[in-house]
Image (spheres, rainbow, N blue to C red):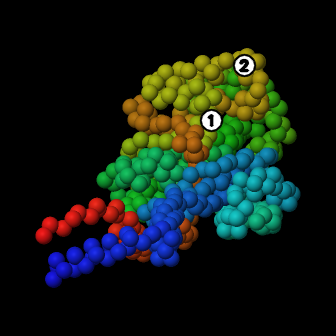
Amino acid sequence: MSAQRAAGSLTDCREMKEKNPWHTPVTISITVIGVIAIVALVTVAVLQNKPVPQKYKYGIVLDAGSSHTALYIYKWPAEKDNNTGRVEQEHSCKVKGKGISSYAETPWQAGESLTECMEDAVKQVPTKRHFETPLYLGATAGMRLLHMENSVASDKVFQAVEKSLQKFPFSYQGARMLSGQEEGAFGWVTVNYLDDRLKQGLETTGALDLGGASTQISFVPKNYIISESPSNSVTFRLYGNDYNLYTHSFLCYGKDQVLRLALAHQTKSGPGEIADPCFHPGYSESKNYSVLYDSPCVSDRKPQGAPVTFHHKGEGNFQQCQEVVKNVFNFTSCKYSRCSFNGVFQPPLHGQFGAFSAYYYVMDFLNLTDTSVPLTTVKDKLAKHCATPWNQIIQQHPEIHVKYLAEYCFSGAYILTLLTEGYNFTSESYSSIKFIKKIKGSDAGWTLGYMLNLTNMIPAEAPDSPPLPHAGYVSIVTVIALLIFTLFIIFLCRFRPSSSKQPQIV
């Protein structure tokens, strides 16, 4: 039977060849179908394998600090990375003027001060993402102090800020004060996130943050129970790992407020003049007692019967300056197994530490960011800077405002005293500190950690997907391929050259 079928097929082919195959309707139809099938196959393959564009979400955080406000724009892929959005800093803008807490008497100006940076943010974030971009303002120690001093004034400042921010086309989520614990913990998240330590499950880095009104220390202790002081414990779950973090914020121990504490100690008797070892020789300024003591950190220490002003002279003696600075700490009382200062519990230091914000800016100016240099050498260099005459300092740094320039000697002495006497870094462990400004293009600080934490509460957006599911794509390609193969066989059959007829031998 198979032989008969084969003979029949050959007979059919010979009959087709005897006709002109190019002009028959069947041939034309086959040709058209074949072309369409090939085009369809190529089109489906191209569309299915076309690169899928990455979609991003955006978030805006305003860091309302004691001395100034900064705006940060973050972006991250719409698809989450192990339940934690991969956030990176896209843009930043420093608000002109002082921190919002300085507008207590004119709260409307606090809102107006943010306008320029907010208009910049409107341009930076894609228009189609405006309505879904969350906008947050976090106020830190400056507003915490204002709230302590005058809660009505702090409420009015927040109201003015909210009124201003709500005018912009973003998803405004509110303005609030961060606790010192939150500020320290989110700073720790930032440092470790940027170093990829959280995602890779590596040993974490501690965080040292120094602002104008407060300072924070945060780290994961080694084999030490933090339950001794629950208020200093924070637990995070990031990238599938749990972190039991020690953190504490010292209000009034930022570099600006601690200078008030030091001056208050030196003027507690209400003198008309003080010789300050923390300022350069030749420095001389008249200062107002009311301005100095106009802060909750020192207001209860103002001497009775003091004159309106006092003469502030510099002597430039680093060793004596350290003794002045030590007077702002209380090392005598501790109800726990161990403390840092002012009776605050602190477990033993562990691991590497990243020091940022004012830590970096002060030590960078003093050219002391290299912690591989022995601590004794660091102190010698700082002593030399403090002893440099004030007029020479001004000549060497004409671009820096004299107020800030005059305070670097004090700030440097305070930082070293805080780290060694306050937090118990030794000559050996001092080298474990790294002074940092940015990590991988993002500013070190609490805002990125804050934004990273918030992305855990933002639903993941489904990524753009190919037009067809994989199974459907495979089925369509298979059908089209079989069709093309069948048409190819038919063409071979129709247009196979005829063999020469041989005479039959009888």
Q: Residue at x 44, y 70 (%)?
A: 21
Placement of the N terminus among the 4 image quadrants: bottom left
The amino acid at mark 1 is Tyr
The residue closer to the viewer here, 504 or 143, is 504
Q: Residue at x 44, y 27 (%)?
A: 372
Residue bearing mark 2: 396
Q: Which mark is residue 361?
A: 1
Residue 120: x percent and y percent? 76, 52
Q: Residue at x 48, y 36 (%)?
A: 434
List the single residue furthest toward the front.
Answer: 506
Q: Which mark is residue 145?
A: none
Q: Is residue 237 visible?
A: yes
Q: Earlier in the sequence, mark 2 or mark 1?
A: 1
Distance CA(mark 2)–CA(mark 1): 17 Å
- Which element is circle 2 on? helix
- Which element is circle 1 on? helix
In the rendered image of this protein, does residue 140 appear above or below residue 419? below
Q: Residues within 10 Å of mark 1 (few under 14, many from 20)?
A: some
Residue 173: x percent and y percent? 68, 68
The residue closer to the viewer here, 258 or 211, is 211
